[in-house]
Amino acid sequence: MPSLENTDIKYLHGVGPKRAELLGKELGIFTFHDLLYYFPFRYVDRSKIHTVSEITGDMPYIQLRGRFINFTPQGEGARRRLQALFTDGTGTVEVVWFNRVRSIQETYRTGVEYVIFGKPSPFQNHYSIIHPEVDVFKPDAEPQGLRGVYSLTEKLQNRSVSQRTLQRLVATLLQSEAVQRVPETLPRQLMTRWKLMPLNEALVAIHVPADVPTLQRAQFRLKFEELFFLELNILKYIKGRTAQLPGLMLAHVGDYFNNFYHHVLSFPLTDAQKRVIREIRHDMASGRQMNRLLQGDVGSGKTIVALMSALIAVDNGYQACIMAPTEILATQHYESIAPMAARIGLSVALLTGSTRKRERDDIHQRLTAGTLHILIGTHALIEDTVHFRNLGLAIIDEQHRFGVAQRAKLWRKNHTPPHVLVMTATPIPRTLAMTVYGDLDVSVIDQLPPGRKPVTTLMRYEKDREQMYRFVGSEIKKGRQVYIVYPLIEESEKLDLRALEDGYHTVSEIFRQYRVAYVHGRMKPAEKDYQMQLFVTRQAQILVATTVIEVGVNVPNASVMVIENAERFGLSQLHQLRGRVGRGADQSYCILMTKYQIASETRHRLEVMVRTTDGFEVAEEDLRQRGPGDMEGTQQSGIPFTLRIANLAQDGQIVQMARDAAQEILAADPQLTTDEGRRLDAHLHRLFDKNVDWSQIS
């Protein structure tokens, strides 16, 4: 018997070649398996029949029992529609169809008792229902109960593939013998321990649940399975990589590290920085390849940790590199690291797309000769022409901005893979850390350097603009500097945003006595660097910019961040922008300028920013609001398949259960060689073989 995975959806009764092509293009449903795993995104209760008199404007749907009073065709050609009046004795609603007008007029009759189901919309002084589901009322029929609602595209609905159509196709599939015989994927001990519903029962119940408790059991079973195999894959490859890829033994802490720590470092490390450096030292001396994720909020001192880690590599006769996503950030790292490194006799270079050929050739020569100790740069570091003599440590900053394939190139720059430290200033919620970055050890710098004051965040409206400008002026008079950030570069009537050009002219006019610099992503690198240097060197007091300054700009004298149209930014981006100030000892401010009329969810997002400066709290809220986002393909590492039912923002407890279960399985059977282990391994291959080998990428 053909498997569900190998049976073309066109062979399901009611589909056929044309509808199969449509389902494939619009929903990615090509096989019986694809349809079976195309789960409803919500459920409606069809057990209750309301009356017209009970309708309110906030009802998502309603089910009514009554009769049509009349049918009235309206309009001509493309504007043709059919209107009908429906009553149950307590009132009337208007029912409207825009498609299949003639067929509907021939099918339904006045005086016949029907049950109609749809979304009521207020229109003038009455309610209307557009394209309802209509069934002849049968007194002895079983009540429908819970029904799944599926995501459909407009094109499908225009081509007569409605909710009812998909529900009928799913019902046909669920009655097939193949679904009844779906093999169990989880070990018996897990089924017993977690009281899990059998897979074939869960797959039926997720589409047509008998009641709410049954639906909840099916959801738990399918979420647990999805997350269990995700965690099992991650943990299995961690073990495999540790066994297969012994790392460079960098156990010596010598003159470079000690001279820097005792004679160059001009401030005490925080306890968090010391703890993280100890963790990194232990990894690099362990004889296994380090793959560590360093999380640290903006301004927490990750760069110093990165430099001191690089010094360990150099003390052991190896080179180190730091790769950043932008020239601004790479240059920032170089300018802060190079002077300190020079004091202990270290050679440091900067390599970006703007590096001239003569400098580039010199860097290549010193790199292969081993006389260049630390190379800092952008994507230019992973070019095929860049060869290290002996790369011992690769540091990747703001690593989420690099694709998987890019990081893999850097990872292969040495015969024995270098130790890898990836850093991010974007705090990662715990559930994401266990999944997207589950194959990395995690270190957290959870302290700010002494003397830093939390940034005060304020939300202000258009009516407060004059007051905001007065405050900006008062800060500049104190000798401080100010960022003003806009979402766009050019005027957009559609989004009704203040464009950077207009903002620049307005700010320049208001603050005529001061110099205003500006940067945006479309400027040539040389012009961008010139404008940035005006601000960095305090020649300009105000920097008008787009989010190009979100990462990597370090101006401790800047004390005010004004974010225009703050309602257009996500929480993570707002937090990153806020991190550009508060980097000195002075009190700093972030002012969120927004329209007064904004959605309640948007207002809540901005209120989170006002309430807390804790990056992890912001990240958790951001995950709840946005979900985990697109974690497929080569843009993100971690999850190599789309989660069909689990939600990392909401299912953190199930993630932990699934990880615990996977760890127990591997503790008892590390190579998955028992009969049950081989079945698990075979299922892992079915799930993951079409994807990138994530175990080989840091």
Image (tube, grey):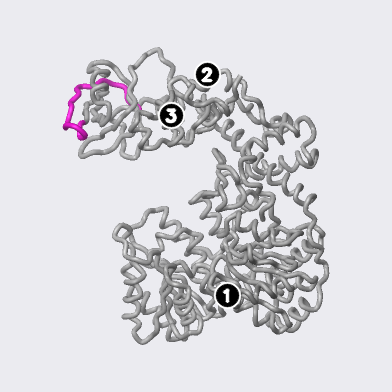
**x, y percent for residue 172:** 48, 20
257 to 42, vertically: above or below: below
Q: What amino acid is at disc 3?
A: Asp
Q: Which residue is mark 2?
A: 175
Discs 3, 1 touching: Cβ within 8 Å: no
Where is residue 51 drawn, in percent x and y?
31, 27
Q: Nearer the viewer, mark 2 or mark 3?
A: 2
Secondary element at image label 3: strand
Amino acid on which disc 1 is placed: Lys
Q: Earlier in the sequence, mark 1 or mark 2?
A: 2
Give the spatial CA distance, label 2 vs label 3.
Answer: 22 Å
Tag in front: 1 or 2: 1
Mark closer to the chain start, 3 or 1: 3
> Which of labels 3 and 1 is toward the front?
1
Give the residues drawn in magenta, as a range: 63-80
Whole-Å distance between the Cαs marked 1 and 2?
Answer: 69 Å
Identify whether 686 is placed above or below 100: below
For label 1, the residue is 357
Residue visible at 55% across and 38% down? 645
User: Could you tell me if residue 310 is visible in this image?
Assistant: no
Q: Check disc 2 and report its element: helix, strand or loop.
A: loop
Q: Secondary structure at mark 1?
A: helix
Callout 3: 10 Å neighbours few (<14), some, many (20+)?
some
Q: Residue at x 40, y 80 (%)?
A: 516
Quarter of the image for residue 131 reads top left
| Residue in the foreground of this view, choosing between 18 and 656 | 18
Is 77 inside the magenta-drawn segment? yes
